Image: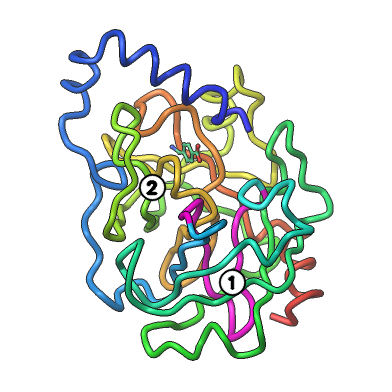
Amino acid sequence: MQSIFLVPLIFSLFWISGKAAVKRRPDGRIVNGREAREGEFPYQLSLRRLTVHICGASVLDGSWAITAAHCVDGHERQPHEFTLRLGSVKRSSGGSIMTVRTIYKHPSYDTTDMNFDVALLRTQAGALTLDPNVAPIKLPEAGEAIQENISAIVSGWGHMSSTEPMLSSVLKYTTVMTVNQQKCQNDLSFHGGVSEAMFCAAARNTDACQGDSGGPLTVQGRLIGIVSWGVGCADPYYPGVYTRLSHPSIRRWVRLLTKL
Ligand code: 4AZ
């Protein structure tokens, strides 16, 4: 939620000092990522509301996808407004489109501090794995700690920089490193800090950004995080924040609903 307020502020600040900002971040992708090849991220979904890409999501099995709660907040009663594009690296074409039947937000999700920013989307049984370019991603074990300095991959069609609020038309990905939880807490203390249901990851000049929210952060084929929030994008002072899927309350809730 904070990012929704902070990002426009940061945009306008950089708008004024536009040239300096462009110099500091000369290139733009996911922010500075690489383009994915078709089939490289078979679990990646584009979540669309009224046909417009709003967020990323990931395939858990044939009928379940996982995303950020803030992506669907306020619209839980209108699941039919949401669709998922699967099996395509292109944001606006290819693969197939499935409708969302039911939206479940984590019961402890808090819109004010983004705690427990996770939602499950149920589609028609088997719908998500009908596409040959689609495959589920595994989940972590309950209670697993996030080791620091582990390299992780985040992907999405989000903004290519804080200064260039434009979605990518092709799926992009980048590598970020998990950040020590205490350091992350300190870095973001002016922005409410991070809870046990969050963790940070960052790398020099590269990051997830708006529009990547809800999308996957994986380590060795396992979905450890969901893009949740941040202060700007690829800012050297602010790591990106991810929902920690191994948090016992999140992991148990996912298992209860999906049996996964
Ligand atoms: C957002 O507004 C957002 N740098 C998501 C991720 C990050 C920043 C903003 C991480 O959805």
Q: Could you say which disc has been placed on residue 193 in the image?
A: none
Where on the picture, by quarter, is residue 118? bottom right
Locate residue 207, reporting x and y percent: 36, 41
Label 2 Cα crowd, 10 Å radius (few <14 / some 14-19 / many 20+): many
Separation of marks 1 and 2 at Cα, in angstroms: 23 Å
| Magenta-tinted stretch | 52-69
Three-letter amino acid code of the residue under disc 1: Leu
Which residue is at the far top? Answer: 16
* 61 part of magenta stretch: yes
Image point (70%, 56%), residue name: 247
Q: 7 left or right of 175? A: right
Three-letter amino acid code of the residue under disc 2: Gly
Label 1 Cα crowd, 10 Å radius (few <14 / some 14-19 / many 20+): some
**For mark 1, what is the residue?**
139
Colour scheme of the rendered structure: rainbow
Locate residue 35, reporting x and y percent: 22, 59
Lower sequence index among marks 1 and 2: 1
Image quadrant containing the N terminus: top right
Q: 56 left or right of 168? A: right
Mark 1 vs 2: CB contact within 8 A: no
Q: Nearer the viewer, residue 226 or 126?
A: 126
Mark 2 residue's CB less than 8 Å from ligand 1: yes
Q: Nearer the viewer, mark 1 or mark 2?
A: 2
Q: Could you say which disc has been placed on residue 158 in the image?
A: 2
**Is the stretch drawn in magenta largely helix, strand or loop?**
strand
Q: Is residue 126 depicted above or below 94 in this figure?
A: below
Image point (49%, 91%), residue name: 130
Q: Is residue 156 depicted above or below 193 in this figure?
A: below
Locate residue 60, reporting x and y percent: 58, 76
Where on the picture, by quarter, is residue 22? top left
Image quadrant containing the C terminus: bottom right
